[in-house]
Image: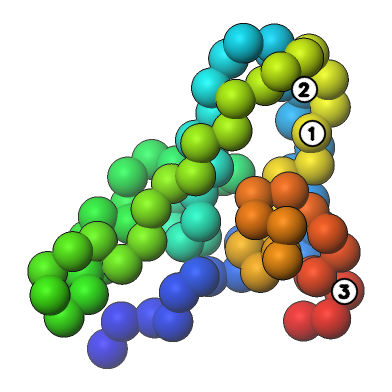
């Protein structure tokens, strides 16, 4: 039996220094071994129609700064932490 996705990786954000103009691919499923970023692990999970159940989410940094990427994968703000981990 396959696990329920998204998998909670940690109940806290991943604080990452991003570079202006660079693209980052956030893992939405929680299966990646390269958290908080995607390594393609989601591709083994398919919907009934054969399409991938989860996808990576692209974040393009407009400026160099610290970004708080969601670690619990349940944020209402998508890939950015909104504190949802405090309610899990």
Mark 3 or mark 1: name the one nearer the start of the chain: 1
Q: Mark 3 falls on what kind of element?
A: helix
Q: Crowding near pointer 1: few (<14 within 10 Å), some, many (20+)?
A: some
From mark 3 to mark 1, how far is it between C-alphas?
18 Å
Asked if residue 5 lies left or right of residue 19, the reply is left
Q: Mark 1 falls on what kind of element?
A: strand
Q: Is residue 28 above or below residue 5?
A: above
| Mark 2 and mark 1 residues within 8 Å of each other at the beta carbon | yes
Q: Residue at left 39%, top 81%?
A: 3
Q: Residue at left 12%, top 75%?
A: 49
The spot of residue 10 in percent (x, y) is: 70, 62
Q: Is residue 81 above or below residue 15?
A: below
Mark 2 or mark 1: name the one nearer the start of the chain: 2
Q: Mark 2 falls on what kind of element?
A: strand
Q: Which mark is residue 17?
A: 2
State which quadrant residue 48 falls in.
bottom left
Quarter containing the C terminus: bottom right
Asked if residue 6 lies left or right of residue 17, the reply is left
From mark 2 to mark 3, how far is it between C-alphas?
23 Å
Q: Which mark is residue 37?
A: none
Q: Residue at left 38%, top 40%?
A: 39
Q: Which residue is mark 1?
A: 67
Q: Crowding near pointer 3: few (<14 within 10 Å), some, many (20+)?
A: few
The spot of residue 76 in percent (x, y) is: 72, 66
From mark 2 to mark 1, how far is it between C-alphas?
6 Å
Asked if residue 30 lies left or right of residue 20, the reply is left
Q: Which residue is mark 3?
A: 86
């Amino acid at each position: 039996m396959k696990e329920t996705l998204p998998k909670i990786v940690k109940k806290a954000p991943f604080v990452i220094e991003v570079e202006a103009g660079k693209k980052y691919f956030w893992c939405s499923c929680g299966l990646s071994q390269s958290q908080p970023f995607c390594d393609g692990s989601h591709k083994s999970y398919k919907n009934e129609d054969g399409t991938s159940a989860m996808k990576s989410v692209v974040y393009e940094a407009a400026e160099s700064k610290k970004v708080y990427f969601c670690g619990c994968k349940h944020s209402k703000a998508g890939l950015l932490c909104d504190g949802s981990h405090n309610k899990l």
